[in-house]
Image: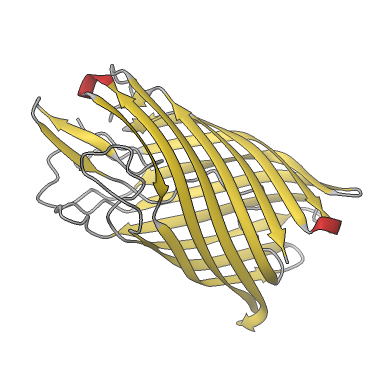
Amino acid sequence: MKLKLSIIGLFLFVLGSTNVFSQETGHYTPGVQGLKVASLPPPGFYYIMHNVYYTADTYYDGNGDKAPIDFDITVFANVHRFLYVWEDVIFGANYGVHVLVPTTYTDISISDFGVNDNKFGVGDIVIEPLILSWNKQKFDAIVALAAIAPTGSYDVNEAASPGKSFWSTMLTFGGTYYFNESKSWHASILNRYEIHGEKKDFDVTPGDDLTFEWGIGKTIVSDQIWGVGVGGYAHWQLTEDKGNDVLYDSSVKDKVFAIGPEVTCYIPKAKLNLELRGQFEFGAVDRPQGTKFCFSLFKNF
């Protein structure tokens, strides 16, 4: 049996009744971006904080069937992002740099495997030195390149470890389309492609992952600027895990989908944007299927 848990990056593979081996999948956790997920904000400095709550008590096997195990996980992530955007730097695009520092609390229980662990800590840091964004009348477009460093603590015997113990490279590309001149109706898609390095101390290299997030919404202008709509994400593992320590069926690749509502509010006088969204997962294969809620704060200076 192959078990993966991308929301915290760690789960347990059990071979027979004696050998326990820990292994990971992709770094990126979807569902924390907004309705205009592929639109970079105007030039300036931004502090962004995401508060993410995820819970699941169901695990789906490689055939997409509910696994007969007593499984439960709760994760709370407090994510801090620092973004600076310069105007019209190269190829007519705004240029940005971005650093993301996650802190997570994870409580995981798998009674069938004797797992009962919880842990709080700083996770793996994202460094994004290249962001290019074009803002036109009918559309926005974005491309970016990031490295994800294994800065979070990791212990093979701790299922709730916040770190993953391998590097990743992430390519981001997407766009937002505006359906009218006032840009009040919009649809957005952002794709993230991850290529992973080898896990430290183990001969396992996780397969490549593709995640896209999307949103369709309406902007309503009053004293504040409101946004309402629906968003979601889709995740697929595209290539097989590799290495001599891959003892499971590497041909099984995980996937999951999610959809849910969102409301946003920008307060111009405070230069503050607030976002609240819920995401309900479905169609899981070889991974948990749960519910995610996210409250985000954007402050520009």
149 left or right, relative to 42: left
Q: x%, y% of residue 129?
A: 49, 73
Considering every residue shown, the one lying at the far right of the view is 223
**Residue name at image x 30 percent, y 41 percent:** 10
Closer to the camera, 259 or 15? 15
Q: Is residue 221 above or below residue 196?
A: above
Q: Is residue 3 above or below residue 196?
A: above
Picture quarter with the C terminus: bottom right
**Residue name at image x 23 percent, y 35 percent:** 12
221 left or right, relative to 126: right
Closer to the camera, 216 or 246? 246
User: In which quadrant of the rendered view does residue 294 lie?
Assistant: top right
Q: Is residue 200 above or below residue 237?
A: below
Picture quarter with the N terminus: top left
Asked if residue 249 shows in the view, the reply is no
User: In which quadrant of the rendered view does residue 256 lie?
Assistant: top left
Q: x%, y% of residue 131?
A: 55, 70
Numbered circles on residues, count: 0
Asked if residue 244 shows in the view, the reply is yes
User: In which quadrant of the rendered view does residue 232 lie?
Assistant: top right
How did the renderer colour the structure? Answer: secondary structure
Q: x%, y% of residue 178?
A: 74, 56
125 left or right, relative to 253: right
91 left or right, relative to 223: left
Q: x%, y% of residue 196?
A: 30, 58
**Residue name at image x 36 percent, y 46 percent:** 162
